[in-house]
Structure formats: C-alpha cells, structure tokens
Amino acid sequence: MRPFQTLRRGVKRPFLSWVDAGERVVARILALITGVVIASALLKLVLYLGSKLLTGSEATWLGDHLIKVLGDLLTVLIALEVLENITSYLRRHVVQIELVLVTALTAVARKVIVLPSGAENKPQLLIGLGIAVVSISAAYWLVKSANIMPAKVFPDQDQSSPPRKANAGESGEGLRN
C-alpha cells in the first residue's frame, strides 16, 4: 500500500501513513499562517514607508527610523525563509538543514541590527549574540563543507592486511571472448 494514497471507505491504512498525513496537514496549516504573517508584515511595511514618503514628514532615514525599516524588512525576509522551509518539507519530505541555518543566521543578524540604544551596557546579551553568530556560522560551514566533499568509500578489508589477489572470475578477465 502506498503511504500517500487517498482515504477511501473500507481501506485500512497503516499507522505511519496516518502520522504522515497528519504532518502534511500541519505543515500546510503552518504554510497558510506564515503566508498571512508575511502579507500583513509586508502591508505594514509598505504603509509605514508610504506614509513617511507621502506626508513629507521630516523623517530622517538615519537613526531609529532606518533601524525600524531594516528590522521590518528582515522580519519579512525571515518569514519568507520559514515559508520556504515549510514548502521544501512538503515537496521533499526532508528538512533542509542549510536553509534552517540560513534562517537562524538571518534572525540573529536581525536581532543584532535592531538592538536598542544602551545595549552596549549589557555585555551578557552581546556575548550571547556573538556566540550564537559564531555557532550558527560554524554549523553552516560544516554542513556546506560536508555537502561539497564527496563521501569517502571505505574498503571492505582492513588496511593492515595485505591486498587480496583477485581470481580471474572476479576481475572480469574470464568474461572476455
């Protein structure tokens, strides 16, 4: 029986198929909620920028206003990355660790960018954010370098024993005409 077959009357489905179907439903609901969050955050950002530009207010695009705009932009970007994580899981049924790490790194970078003034007086917060950045970056580097290098093939025999001589049938020489 296929694990993704549709539910019909009289057909018994294994327990894992039910679990899999439940995961897919939850992932779709999360994708829908994330889409609503992205749309509302984008609308808020557009309205904020539009009001600042159209009213001609003396909004300096430096300082707190710039930090707020960058924070909102990064929030939308993080939500898009979370949506990509969910849709990737729905398509391949595999969590892509690289995408998760990039999302986490973006979230920590957003936190660093939007730190309020006076945060420099909180060394524990700064050390914690620094450790988070280094840890996530190291994890991303490890995953990326593991994906670049080909997998090592381990020989069937122990390296300490001498190589075994192949018989004529094993080497393929006996098969030639």
Image (tube, helix red, strand yellow):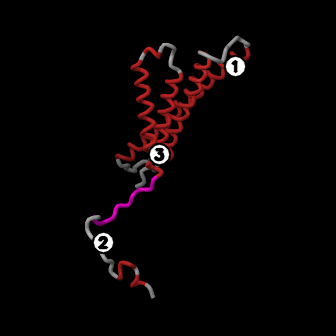
- List the residue tagged with mark 2: 163
- Which residue position is annotated with label 1? 50
Residue 101: where, in percent of width, then height? Answer: 46, 37
Rounded to the nearest whole Å, what is the CA distance between mark 3 and mark 1? 40 Å
Other-residue count near label 2 (Cα within 10 Å), few / some / many at <14 / 14–19 / ≥20: few
In the rendered image, the vertical position of residue 44 relative to residue 99, given as above or below: above
Task: State whether the magenta stretch is mostly helix, strand or loop.
Answer: loop
Mark 2: secondary structure: loop
Residue position marked by numbered label 3 in the rendering: 144
Q: Is residue 132 left or right of residue 81?
A: left
Q: Earlier in the sequence, mark 1 or mark 2?
A: 1
Q: CA distance from mark 2 to mark 3?
A: 35 Å
Number of residues whose C-alpha sits closer than 10 Å to that of mark 3, classed few (under 14), some (14–19) or many (20 or more): few
Q: Secondary structure at mark 1?
A: helix
- What secondary structure is marked by label 3? helix
Residue 174 rendering spot, x and y as whole percentages: 39, 85
Where residue 47 appears, as percent x and y from the top left, is 66, 19
Q: Quadrant of the N terminus?
A: bottom left
The mark lying in front, picked from 3 and 1, is 3
Q: Amino acid at mark 1?
A: Gly
Residue type, mark 2 in image: Pro
User: Alpha-carbon distance for marks 1 and 2?
Assistant: 75 Å
Residue at image coords 53%, 33%? 32
Q: Which residues are magenta?
A: 149-158
Q: Amino acid at mark 3?
A: Lys
In the image, taking residue 57 as reference, residue 29 lies left or right, namely left
Q: Residues within 10 Å of mark 1 (few under 14, many from 20)?
A: few
